[in-house]
Image (spheres, helix red, strand yellow):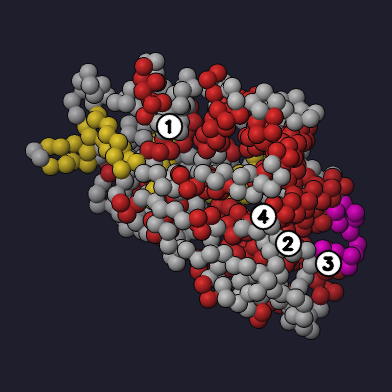
Amino acid sequence: MKKLSTLLLASALVTVLMAACKEDFLDKSPESGLDTEEVFSKYDNFKRFFDTIYEGTKLDGTTWRDYNIKTAFSLYFNFWDQKYTLESLTDMSDMGRSMDAQVVKAGSVSAVINKMTYDQARRPVLGSMFQIIRICNMSLANIDKLTGVNAEDINDFKGQSHFIRAFAHFTLFRLWGAMPYLTTVIGPDDQWDVARLSKRETLLRIAADMDSAATFFAKADLMRRDPGPGVAGHLNSPNQFRPGGVAAKAMKGRALLYAASPLNNEQGIKDWEAAAAANWEAIKIAESFGFDLLSLADYKKNYIGTTYSNEQLWAWYAGTKTYNTGDLAGLNNGIFGASKTSFSGESPTQNTVDKFETKWGEPLNTAADRQAAIAAGHYNDQDPYANRDPRFYIDIIYNTAPVPGYGKAQIYYETVNGAANYGQLLDQSYAGITKTGYYLRKTWGEQSVNNKTTPQYTDPIIRLGELYLNYAEAANEAYGPNGMAPGASMTALQALNKIRKRAEMPDVLDAYTGSKDALRERIKNERTIELCFEGSHYYHDIRRWKDAPEVMTSTLIGMDIEKVPVSKTYPTGFKYIRQPLPATRQVKWKDAMYYFPFNTDDTYKMKNFTPNVVW
C-alpha cells in the first residue's frame, strides 16, 4: 500500500489550477517511477484511489479532508471556517459579523478568491474540482487494468467516474463560467493552455457525461443505491453516498436547465424544450424507482435530523454536529453556539421573508402586493407573521417564534426610561447579533447551549422537489403555463402546484396563470422559497436568470422590532418597522460578478484560456 499512498499523495498535492503556469497546471502527471499497475489492477487499491473524491474517505489512517477533496460537495460553503455562505453573498441573507461576506457584496473579491483557489488551509474549490476531474480521468483510463471483478463493478466505477467528472465541471462552471471539458489525463508534454468552450457547450458536455453515467449505472443495476420503499434496507445502503442512475438523469436535467437560461441560452426556445424533456424524463425515472416527495410533516428530513430521505436523489451526509462546533459558525449565531466573539450566523433579510406568501397564496413581495393582501383581510403589517406559507415557520426564526430552550424568541428591544433593554436573542454582549430581525431555522437543527442536541446534517445535493420546479420553469418557457413537453402528463402549472400542494399551499392564483411572463415570476418565487438555504441555489439562480443586476442593487431591508403596549394599532404588543440595513451591509453589482475571477497574478499567464475579469 505504500506505493498507492505515494501515488495518491503526489496526485492530490499537485496544484491543479486552470489559471496557473505550466509547472502548476491542473493535470500535471504523477511523478515517474510509480507502480500504477499495482494501483489499478487490484479492486481494493482501485477503490481506495477512486474514493478519495468522497469526503470522509481514509487512506492508511489519513483523512482525505486534509487534501481538500471535501469540496466536491456543495455544503462546503456552509461548513467552513470563513463564516459565510453563498446565500449571504446575495440579498437573501446577512451575516451577523461584518466579515468577508460584506466585502464581497460590496464588489471586492480579494477577501475570498485566494481561499477558493489556492489556499490549501481553506479547502479551495477550484483546485479540488480539478483534482477530482483528474482522478476520474485516471480511473477511466486505467479501468481495463482491473482484474478479478464482475461487470457490475466495472460499470459502477465507470458510472461514478462519468458522473463525478461532470459534477466537478458543473461546480466549476457555476462559479467560474465556461471551461475546457477534460476527458483525458494531460501529461507534462501535452498542450496545457486549453481554450474554453462556450457556456452552452460546457453544459451540453456535462449533460452528455451524465447521460453516459446513467447508461453505466443501468448496466450495473444501480439506478438507485438502496432498495425502494417497503423493502428491507431502504435508505440504509452503505453506498448511498455514491450517485446512481436516477441522480445522473436529474443532474442532466439541471445542466440543460442552466443551458436554456438567459445567461447561457443560444438557441432560444429549443434550449427550453430540451430542458423540459430532460427534466420530465428524470421525473418519470425517479418516480419509477420509488422516489417521492416527503410530506410537509417530514419535510425537514431532507436536510436535518436523518441520514437520507426518499426525496433525495443524491445527498451528502455530513454527520452529527454539536451546538458549539466551529463547523456551524457560519450558519448559527453565537447566542446559540455559546460563543460571544467567533460565531457569525446567517440572518435572512426582510427581502427574503417577503417572498413567503400568505397562506391564501397572495404574494407579499412589493408594497402593492402587501396592500392588496391587507385589503383582502389576509395580512397585517403589525402582525406580519400570522397566516403565512407553512414553510416560513420551518425556515425562519422570527420574533415570538417558538425556539427550544428559549421559549418565544425575543428579537426585540424595549425602551425604558429612555434606554433600550434588549431581548434575549438580541443580547448586545454577543458579536454578530442579527441586523435583520431574523435568524435561520431551516438548517439550524434547533440545537444550542440551551438545547444541547446533536442533530444529523445532510446536504440534499439534488432532490425530487427540484425536478418538478426545473420542469415547471422549462415547460413554461417552452410551452406556456398550460403546455407540456412531448410525452409528458403534467403541465408547467401542474408541476408548480404539486410542490405547493406538498407545502399545504393553494394553487397559484388565477391572476398569475394567464401567460408565461406572469407565471415565470411565481415559479422563481416558489423556487426561491422551496430551495432556500439549500446548496446555494439562489446564488446561482439569480445569475442564470440574469436577475442579479436588479436584485443585487436593491436595498437590503431588516425589521426593527420594539416592544410596546398592546393596542388596536399594535395588536401583538410589538411595533414592526421596516428599515434599510446599515450601508456597510448593502450590496453592489458589477457585471464581472457573474463569475469569480482567478488569482490576479495568473490572468496574464494564459493565451488560449481567456481568464475572467478581475473585480
Q: Sequence-wise, which precedes: disc 3 or disc 1? A: 3
Of residues 319 and 183, which is closer to you in this image? 183
Q: Nearer the viewer, mark 4 or mark 1?
A: 4
Give the crowd class for mark 1: few <14, some 14-19, many >=20 residues within 10 Å: some
Which residue is under mark 3?
A: 141
Please tell me which residue is depicted at 55% across the width and 18% down the height of the picture.
510
Please tell me which residue is depicted at 46% across the width and 23% down the height of the picture.
362
Name the kind of residue labelled 4 in the image.
Answer: Lys
Left or right of residue 192: residue 104: left
Residue 365 image label: 1
Which residue is under mark 2?
A: 181
Q: Quadrant of the N terminus?
A: bottom right
Of residues 349 and 344, which is closer to you in this image? 349
Where is residue 14, by image quadrant? bottom right
Of residues 304 and 474, which is closer to you in this image? 474
Q: Nearer the viewer, mark 3 or mark 2?
A: 2
The reply to whether dot 3 and dot 1 touch (C-beta < 8 Å) is no
How many angstroms separate mark 4 from mark 1 (CA)?
A: 32 Å
**Can residue 515 be found in the magenta stretch?**
no
Question: In the image, is residue 415 above or below residue 498?
Answer: below
Please tell me which residue is depicted at 66% across the width and 28% down the height of the picture.
480
Q: Sequence-wise, which precedes: disc 4 or disc 1? A: 4
Name the kind of residue labelled 3 in the image.
Answer: Ala
Left or right of residue 74: residue 330: left
Question: For the residue labelled by badge 3, is the local secondary structure a helix, a strand or a loop?
Answer: helix
Residue 199 image label: 4
Camera sees residue 83: no
